[in-house]
Each structure stands twice: as C-alpha cells, then as structure tokens.
Amino acid sequence: MPDLTGRGMRRALLALASATALAAFGLPATGVARTAHAAGRTVHVIEHANTDDEIPTGGGKDVKGNILTFVNPIYNAANTRQVGHDEGFCTRLDPQKGVWECLWTTFVNGGQITVQGPFYDTRNSTLAITGGTGPYRNARGQMKLVSRNGGKAYDFIFELS
C-alpha cells in the first residue's frame, strides 16, 4: 500500500499536479517532460504547411505586398497525431531578403495562441506571443519557428511566460 503520509503524500500530490498540468495542454502524462517542462511553460507542436497559398496583389508572384494565407493541421511534438490547426496570413515585405510579416492563431487543446512577427524564407525566426484564449488566456512570451523538411513542416515552440 502506498505511503500517503508525509513525504509519500507530497509525492502523490506532485504527481497528480504534474499529470493535471500536462492534461491541460492535451499532452499524455508519459514521455512528455522534455516537451512540457517547467510546469507547462513550453508547448511544442508541429505544423504541416500544406495549404499555404500566395495571393498576388497586382505585381506577380513573390513581390512586395503579396499575401500568403494558410489553414494548416497541427500535430503533437512526436509528429504522430493531429492536435489542432492554425490559420493566418503573412505579407511579403522584401522578396530579395526573403522577409514576410505574419499574424496567425494556433488552435490547440481547447484554446488559441496568437503570434505576430517575421517569417524568413531561408532561416528560422522568433515571433511574439500576443495573447490567447482558454488555457492560454494569459499567454505571453515568444514562439520559436523552426523549419523542417525544406519548409514542408515547422516546429512551433511556444515559450509561455
């Protein structure tokens, strides 16, 4: 029988609190400590960029002012199960430097996290977390955007503060 007095009770309560925090982010309680460390302050998901569509604004493809729109599926950090989706848009600012300015919302685990910031054609970036809803209603911090598979997928690493 487990020791539910003193140190045993504290351990049981800590285990329950950890499992509850992970469940709030829709993550399983096993094998996730690396992803949801520091009491759930980091949320790591993967976007499959399969609906990105550049809309020319009058000057042709890949020119300043063009808009990129998307609604893409979001997968867990293991990239094995869809856990949500995102939707947003980017405006092309400088084709020669490969710069876009983006705004989007990631819908995951009963809430939303919004971000704004740069996207680069050839390098990773960091965007500002501008807010959220549900379990993320007080969200602030930054999101690291890391390209995988030549831009066919992206790691979204939300560092919530």
Image (cartoon, rainbow, N blue to C red):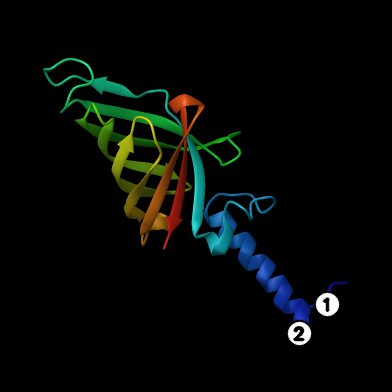
The residue positioned 64% from the left and 60% from the top of the image is: 19
Q: Is residue 150 left or right of residue 56?
A: right
Q: In which quarter of the view is residue 86 placed?
A: top left
Q: How crowded is mark 2: few (under 14 residues within 10 Å), some or many (20 or more)?
A: few
Q: 133 above or below 84?
A: below
- Outermost residue, top side: 60
Which of 149/109 is in front? 149
- Asked if the residues shown at circle 2 and circle 1 are in contact, with their CB atoms under 8 angstroms apart, the answer is yes
Counting from the top left corner in percent of width and height, residue 124 is at 41, 39
- Outermost residue, bottom side: 6
Label ID, residue 3: 1
Q: Tag 2, which secondary structure?
A: loop
The residue positioned 47% from the left and 47% from the top of the image is: 157
Q: In this view, does 42 lie to the left or right of 65?
A: right
Amino acid bearing label 2: Gly
The residue positioned 37% from the left and 23% from the top of the image is: 51
Counting from the top left corner in percent of width and height, residue 7 is at 76, 81
> Mark 2 = which residue?
6
Counting from the top left corner in percent of width and height, residue 140 is at 35, 59
Q: Residues within 10 Å of mark 1 (few under 14, many from 20)?
A: few
Counting from the top left corner in percent of width and height, residue 143 is at 40, 49
Q: 97 above or below 27?
A: above
Q: 27 above or below 63?
A: below
Q: Is residue 22 left or right of residue 64?
A: right
Amino acid bearing label 1: Asp
Which of 68/2 is in front? 68
